[in-house]
Image: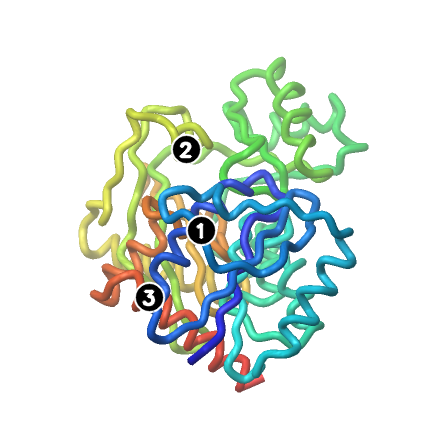
């Protein structure tokens, strides 16, 4: 029997979504195959003792009080894991956004010699920092929105004027490194720009400004690495919001899902090829959700890659993967775990 450590929570703005993802994963892991151990990571980055009991109807039952210091709690986690048969032990780092998708936890697990599912340090860091990934997509000649960026200390009227002249209005302002559309604003006027920029800079010291692409944002699940990469059919949230922000994605009653997203077969094939090219350009491995814009001109533009997308019951990634392979969620988790072991053994 394999031993699975599920790390969940974390110190990002997506802490609660990570708990919801972790609960869905824990409930669907095959009881006959895995010995499951849960570790909660609080908003300060402290690790809880391992536990196995939880309320299957309440993700907040995964939250634990942690009295140890961050260093002592992490040392305690490593000491416990060190007693396992590491050839049959794997980590599921169910931590979205900062700390979970920026390479931090992957680097920590690499340094500790622990096997885990999903992307490694480099691809996680690249995809989390949207300025860096935009630069890579540009070098790879993958179509994307026009963009400019600056650091917090350089955000001023001169930068605002440069962006308006180059990108044009309306435009999108966002933190370079954050997730779930937190801190993202649509800007219609110069007067709105400064407020939007200051909001984005609450979440990161680097600000990204992008052209507003008119069209539909679509999402695709991508799994595998090297020449063995599978891509799902696209899905989309159809919303009346000005863009797919946090509220539209998680709370709006007017937002509806389209899974799969209806498009002609030729365009669907092009979307899948484009998503695969973006995934490879960023060095992704294991799995990711690739978000692209399907423009009114029928062109495709890369938006971003989520290297540990949501695994909640309503999240698109797992549902697209289930549709791709015609299996249930438990089998998808088996596939991701087997892939994690395979890549660890090949290193």
- Which numbered disc flags the more N-terminal residue, 3 or 1? 1
Q: CA distance from mark 1 to mark 2?
A: 32 Å
**Mark 2 residue crowding within 10 angstroms, few (<14) / some (14–19) / many (20+):** some
Disc with the residue nearer the chain's start (1 vs 2): 1
Are circles 1 and 2 on residues that touch, CB within 8 Å? no
Label ID, residue 332: 3
- Quarter in which the C terminus is drawn: bottom right
Q: As drawn, is 268 to the left or to the right of 218?
A: left
Mark 2, residue position: 244
Binning the other alpha carbons within 10 Å of mark 3 as few (below 14), some (14 to 19) or many (20 upward) gives: some
In this picture, is 66 found above or below 337?
A: above
Q: Report the residue marked by disc 1.
A: 54
Tag 3 or tag 2, which sits nearer the N-term? 2
- Residue closer to the observer: 281 or 95: 95
In the picture as drawn, the residue positioned furthest to the right comes out as 153
Percent x, y of residue 122: 63, 65
Q: Residue furthest top?
A: 191
Give the residue displayed 26% in from the left and 39% down from the top.
257
Q: How many marks?
A: 3
Judging depth in this view, the residue of 272 and 233 nearest the camera is 233
Q: Are marks 2 and 3 in contact (CB under 8 Å)?
A: no
Task: Tell me residue 203's x, y (percent).
Answer: 66, 35
Give the label on residue 152, or none. none
Is residue 157 among the parts visible in the rendering? yes
Q: Secondary structure at mark 1?
A: loop
Instruction: Give me the residue at 69% from left, 51% from top.
Output: 46
């Amino acid at each position: 029997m394999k031993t699975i450590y599920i790390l969940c929570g974390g110190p990002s703005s997506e802490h609660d979504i990570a708990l919801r993802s972790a609960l869905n994963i824990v409930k669907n892991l095959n009881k006959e195959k895995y010995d499951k151990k849960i570790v909660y990571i609080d908003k300060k980055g402290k690790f809880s003792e391992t536990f196995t009991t939880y309320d299957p109807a309440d993700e907040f039952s995964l939250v634990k009080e942690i009295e140890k210091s961050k260093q002592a709690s992490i040392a305690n986690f490593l000491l416990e894991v060190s007693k396992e048969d590491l050839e049959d032990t794997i980590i599921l780092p169910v931590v979205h956004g900062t700390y979970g998708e920026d390479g931090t936890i992957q680097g920590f697990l690499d340094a500790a010699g622990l096997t885990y599912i999903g992307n490694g340090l480099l691809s996680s860091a690249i995809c989390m920092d949207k300025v860096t990934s935009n630069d890579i997509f540009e070098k790879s000649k993958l179509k994307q929105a026009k963009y400019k960026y600056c650091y917090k200390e350089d955000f001023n009227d001169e930068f605002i004027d440069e962006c308006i002249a180059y990108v044009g209005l309306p435009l999108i302002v966002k933190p370079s490194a954050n997730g779930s559309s937190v801190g993202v604003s649509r800007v219609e006027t110069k007067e709105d720009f400064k407020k939007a920029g200051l909001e984005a800079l609450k979440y990161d010291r680097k600000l990204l400004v992008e052209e507003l692409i008119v069209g539909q944002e679509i999402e695709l699940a991508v799994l595998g690495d090297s020449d063995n990469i599978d891509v799902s059919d696209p899905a989309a949230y159809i919303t009346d919001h000005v863009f797919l922000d946090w509220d539209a994605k998680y709370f709006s009653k007017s937002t509806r899902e389209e899974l799969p997203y209806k498009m002609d077969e030729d365009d669907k094939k092009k979307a899948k090829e484009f998503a695969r090219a973006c995934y490879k350009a960023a060095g992704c491995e294991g799995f990711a959700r690739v978000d692209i814009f399907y423009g009114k001109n029928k062109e495709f533009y890369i938006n971003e890659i989520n290297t540990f997308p949501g695994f909640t019951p309503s999240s698109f990634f797992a549902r697209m993967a289930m549709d791709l392979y015609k299996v249930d969620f438990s089998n998808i988790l088996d596939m991701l775990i087997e892939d994690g072991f395979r890549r660890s053994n090949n290193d």
